Amino acid sequence: MGMTSGVIERPAELRALMRFLLSMSEHPAGLAIEGDAGIGKTTLWLSGVAAARERGYHVISARAGAAETVLAYTTIADLLGDVDHTIVERLPEVQRLAVDRVLLRTTAQGPSTDESVVAAAFAAIVTRLSATAPVLVAIDDVQWLDPSSHAVLAAVARRFTGPIGLLLTERTEHEGEGAAVHLRLGSGRFDTLRVGPLSLRGLHTLISQRLGRSFPRPTMARIAEISAGNPFYALELARAIDAGGSLSKLPATLAELMRMRIGRLDTDAQHLLLAAASASNPTVELIARVTGTDLAHTAELLGEAAAKGIITVDGNEVRFTHPLLARAVYTDATPSRRRAVHRALAETSAMLELRARHMALAAASADPATLAALDSAAAAGDRGAP
C-alpha cells in the first residue's frame, strides 16, 4: 500500500507527509493535520501511518472519540495496547504498575498512580522503542483526547529526543486554540498542515472510486457547490442521488442528508446503531447484550449497516465510518431512547468511571444511585482519573 492509496488530489499534503516522515527518522518532529469535519484529515493520517509502517518504523496509534473524553487515560491505553509486554516488564516497578493499571491489566493495590508516573512510563517506552527504529506516535481526532491522556502527551512531547514523530489530526471548525497546540515538542520542528476542499475534478474522481458511478457535469458542479468541496458531504449528496433522490429536492444540510440515509435502515438496525454510538468501544457482543438482541441477528443487522457504508465490523469491533454518522445516529434518537440505551450500558459496565457516565446520561435527575456511582468513580483515583 503506497502513500497515495486512497488519497485523491492531495500532492502538496502528501509531500508534507513525506518530509515529516524523513525528518522524524533523525530527530523529533511533529505534524498536525487540521481541517473541517469530513474534509479528509483521517485519510491523510492513515496514509502517513501506513507509509511509516512500510518504512519499518515503530507505530503506536490511537483514534480518539467523543464518547471517551470522560474516561481517564483512554488514548494512552490505546497507544500502549500493542506495545510488546517485554518492554513494559523492564520498567521500574512503579511505572510498570502504572501501565498495567492504565491498560486495566491489574487491580493490585499500591501508591496512587498520577499523571507524572504515567508520563514517565510512556516516555521510557517510546525512548526504548526508538533505540531500534524511528517511532511514530499517531493520534486521530486529538480534540477528543481525555484530560489525563492530554496531560501525559503534553508532558512527554516536550521530552522527546531522537527519531520520534508525533502525527495528529484535529477538527478545526471554530476559532481559538485547539488541543494540538499544547502537544508541542521541546525540540525539533512541529508543522501544521491545513486541509482544504477538493476541486470539481477531485470530487468526480472520489465519487467514481467510492460509488462506482459518475454524474453529468452539471450535477457534479452542483454537488461541488453545495458541499463546498468537502469530500464527505459530496459523497453523501452523491449517495442520496444514487438512491433515487433529485438534487433539487435533497435536504439542505449534511445533518439532514445523514438522517435520511440512516432512516433507510431497518428500525432494529437503527436501535443497534444507537447502542454503538453511545458506547466508547462498541463490539458486536456488547451491542447484542445491551439491546437484548440475539447475537446472530445482531451480526446480520450490523452487516446490513456495514454494507451501506455506515459502519465497519472488524471481527468483534464495530466502528462508524465517520464520526459525523455516529453523531447523527445519537442526536436523532429521542431523549427517552438515549436514556434507555445508557441505562443498559451502565448495567453491563464493570468500569466505575464508565458506569457512572452512563448512569448520569440515563438519569433525568440526580437520583441516589447515580450520585453513588459518581462517588465511586471519583474514588477510582488509583487509575489516575482527574
Image (cartoon, rainbow, N blue to C red):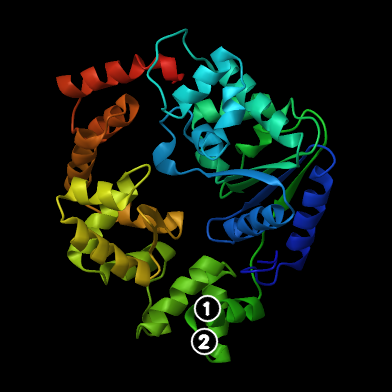
* Element type where label 1 sits in the image: helix
- The structure residue drawn at horizontal position 61% and vertical position 20%, both measured from the top left corner, is 91
The residue positioned farthest toward the front in the image shown:
86
Q: Disc 1, disc 2: CB below 8 Å?
A: yes
The residue positioned farthest toward the bottom in the image shown:
216
Rendered image: mark on residue 22: none
- The structure residue drawn at horizontal position 66% and vertical position 51%, both measured from the top left corner, is 33
Instruction: Residue 291: give x, y in percent of width and height.
Output: 18, 50
Q: In this view, does 167 lie to the left or right of 270?
A: right
Picture quadrant of residue 17: bottom right
Instruction: Residue 239: give x, y in percent of width and height.
Output: 42, 77
Please indicate, yes or no, whether residue 367 appears anywhere in the rendered image: no
Instruction: Tell me if mark 1 has few (under 14), some (14-19) or many (20+) residues whose alpha carbon lies within 10 angstroms of its own.
Output: many
Q: In this view, does 218 lie to the left or right of 184?
A: left
**Residue denoted by label 2:** 219
Q: Nearer the viewer, residue 261 or 285?
A: 285
Q: Nearer the viewer, residue 353 or 338?
A: 353
Instruction: Residue 360: give x, y in percent of width and height.
Output: 25, 30
Say above or below: 55 vs 63: below
**Residue denoted by label 1:** 223
Q: Indicate the amino acid at tag 2.
A: Thr
- Distance of label 1 from label 2 (alpha carbons): 6 Å
Q: Indicate the amino acid at tag 1.
A: Ile
Instruction: Tell me if mark 2 has few (under 14), some (14-19) or many (20+) residues whose alpha carbon lies within 10 angstroms of its own.
Output: some
Instruction: Residue 225: give x, y in percent of width and height.
Output: 56, 75
Q: Where the N terminus falls, by quadrant? A: bottom right
Q: Is residue 33 left or right of residue 83?
A: right
